[in-house]
């Protein structure tokens, strides 16, 4: 019988799940309790799907943090008023096609929540864009550019971003909270510091370089770090031990690659948020950054 | 001459956004049994980078300089697209056989693998489909040749992604019914979602 994947640590997943729940609860306070309903539907869908799948395969199954983390991350990537049927469909896609198909927890190649995000974005682009809410007024917004360049560098804007006064997805609205929880993840060594640090530093660097040539398309390099989902992705998604590289050098390259692709897509493409695409692209490229012996050793 | 910005857009469109394998499933036959190894992909790519631009350039000339001109003169009354499809098949066969002989003389080490794939490529949709797509979209002969090169590179890139991903799934407990082509198609679908981000 194949041994369990050594990179799956249930204790770490427990802590991650708690933090995600707290993030979602904060977002529910900022926007509305509907966010909690989204999380509930996502978790139920994910758990039921895994139980049914494992029963079909006639394998023993235990509900643990590994079953709820993917649905919770998916909800944190979604706008706060996404219709519930889309939450269910997205969770189904992410859990089934992103995780179970590849063999279950620890075997997935792509981050399942990110795959689910892309599926919802491509399948329901109009509804996705129309599901954002202004956190200050509570009114629905027709569309939001998560990485727009209106931020000119005032302290008010910075505090607004930190305290969740600008519209964003569920998990990324309050940047200050993302920082706090991100710091906890690094302190507890649940997340490797190399990945978020390389992402953020490289993002600032590339934004600064590109803004010299295309000032209209690229914002202030410092503020670019606080916009969109970059902070949240850097701490909570890119650091996923299953889909990120194993060696230290590869992790730094992985972070730099995410940063570069993010900056390019944000500046030149019409995508709502480049970091999502960057993460999943680097999930696919990640193994190329490591010596083949490292990959083969883990497969033994 | 093509402007630099247009050139970059052409590369991104041909390699990623309008990738023939992801968007049109052209050349899917190559991965039906198993995914080629990186070395085999490289050799296949070499064959494609020679064949597809040649075929698409020739197709462009035939379509625009011969068929289109004849149509304007009123000598060809049938639908040009129908004719182009038929003629493209002939062009592809001629090109592939010519390229095979060329590779045999110039790159003998590549020849053995190329022969294995030549018959497959002649009968597959990849080269033929690429020629038809390029002829319909290219504005100039240079553009048609360059598109042929980038389409080949895009195809090879996706195959390489597929190989790298399959390597990681060697001992994974994948459901029996999903092993092989179904799993590859799912991976291709996820990669297609990924490249959709580069549109615009």
Image (cartoon, grey):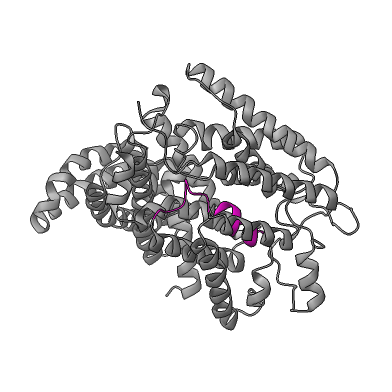
| Horizontal arrangement in the rendering, residue A180 relative to residue B122 (left or right) | right
Question: What residue is at 8 percent from the left and 55 percent from the top?
Answer: B105
Q: Is residue B93 left or right of residue B154?
A: left
The residue sitting at 31% across, 57% down in the picture is B53
Q: Quadrant of the C terminus of chain A?
A: top left
Q: Quadrant of the N terminus of chain A?
A: top left
Q: Is residue A11 magenta?
A: no
- The boundaries of the magenta stretch are A229-246
Q: Report whether residue B48 is seen.
A: yes
Residue nearer the viewer, A168 or B159: A168
Residue A236 drawn in magenta: yes
Percent position of residue B5, x then y:
50, 72
Q: How many numbered marks are there?
A: 0
Residue A230: where, in percent of width, then height? 62, 61
Q: Is residue B199 visible?
A: no
Q: Position of residue B132 (x, y in %)?
A: 40, 48
Quadrant of residue A174 within the rendered picture:
bottom right
Residue placed most toward the observer, A103 or B56? A103
Can you give x and y, in whole percent of width and height, for residue A80 in the image? 78, 47
């Amino acid at each position: 019988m194949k041994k369990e994947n050594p990179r799956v640590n249930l204790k770490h997943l427990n802590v991650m799940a708690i933090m995600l729940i707290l993030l979602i609860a904060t977002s529910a306070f900022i926007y509305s309790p509907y966010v909690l309903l989204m999380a509930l539907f996502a978790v139920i869908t994910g758990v039921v799907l895994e139980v049914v799948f494992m029963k079909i395969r006639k394998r023993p199954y235990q509900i643990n943090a590994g079953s709820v983390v993917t649905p919770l991350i998916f909800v944190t990537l979604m706008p706060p008023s996404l219709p519930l049927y889309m939450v269910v469909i997205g969770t189904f896609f992410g859990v089934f096609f992103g995780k179970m198909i590849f063999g279950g927890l620890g075997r997935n190649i792509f981050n399942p929540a990110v795959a689910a995000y892309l599926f919802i974005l491509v399948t329901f682009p109009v509804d996705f864009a129309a599901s954002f809410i202004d956190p200050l007024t509570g009114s629905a917004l027709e569309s939001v550019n998560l990485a727009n360049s209106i931020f000119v560098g005032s302290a008010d804007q910075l505090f607004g971003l930190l305290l969740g006064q600008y519209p964003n997805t569920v998990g990324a609205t309050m940047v200050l909270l993302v920082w706090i929880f991100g710091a906890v993840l690094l302190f507890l060594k649940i997340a490797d510091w190399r990945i978020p640090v390389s992402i953020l530093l490289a993002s600032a660097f590339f934004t600064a370089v590109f803004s010299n040539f295309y000032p209209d398309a690229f914002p202030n390099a410092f503020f670019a770090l606080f916009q969109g989902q970059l902070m949240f992705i850097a701490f909570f998604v890119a650091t996923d031990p299953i889909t990120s590289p194993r060696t230290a050098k590869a992790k730094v390259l992985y972070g730099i690659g995410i940063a570069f692709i993010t900056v390019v897509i944000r500046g030149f493409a019409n995508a709502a948020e480049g970091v999502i695409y960057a993460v999943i692209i680097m999930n696919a490229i990640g193994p190329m950054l490591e010596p083949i012996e490292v990959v083969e050793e883990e497969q033994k | 001459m093509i402007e630099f910005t247009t050139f970059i857009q052409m590369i991104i469109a041909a390699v990623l956004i309008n990738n023939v394998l992801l968007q049109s499933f052209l050349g899917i036959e190559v991965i039906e049994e198993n995914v080629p190894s990186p070395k085999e992909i490289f050799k296949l790519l070499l064959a494609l980078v020679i064949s597809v631009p040649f075929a698409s350039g020739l197709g462009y000339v035939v379509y625009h300089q011969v068929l289109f001109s004849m149509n304007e003169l009123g000598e060809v009354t049938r639908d040009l697209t129908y004719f182009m499809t038929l003629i493209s098949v002939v062009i592809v066969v001629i090109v592939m056989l010519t390229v095979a002989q060329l590779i045999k003389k110039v790159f003998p080490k590549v020849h053995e693998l190329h022969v294995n794939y030549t018959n497959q490529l002649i009968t597959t949709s990849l080269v033929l489909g690429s020629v038809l797509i390029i002829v319909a979209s290219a504005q100039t002969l240079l553009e048609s040749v360059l598109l042929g090169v980038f389409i080949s590179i895009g195809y090879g890139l996706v195959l390489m992604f597929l190989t790298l991903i399959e390597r990681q799934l060697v001992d994974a407990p994948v459901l029996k019914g999903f092993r092989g082509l179904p799993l590859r198609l799912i991976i291709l679908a996820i990669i297609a979602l990924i490249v959709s981000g580069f549109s615009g």
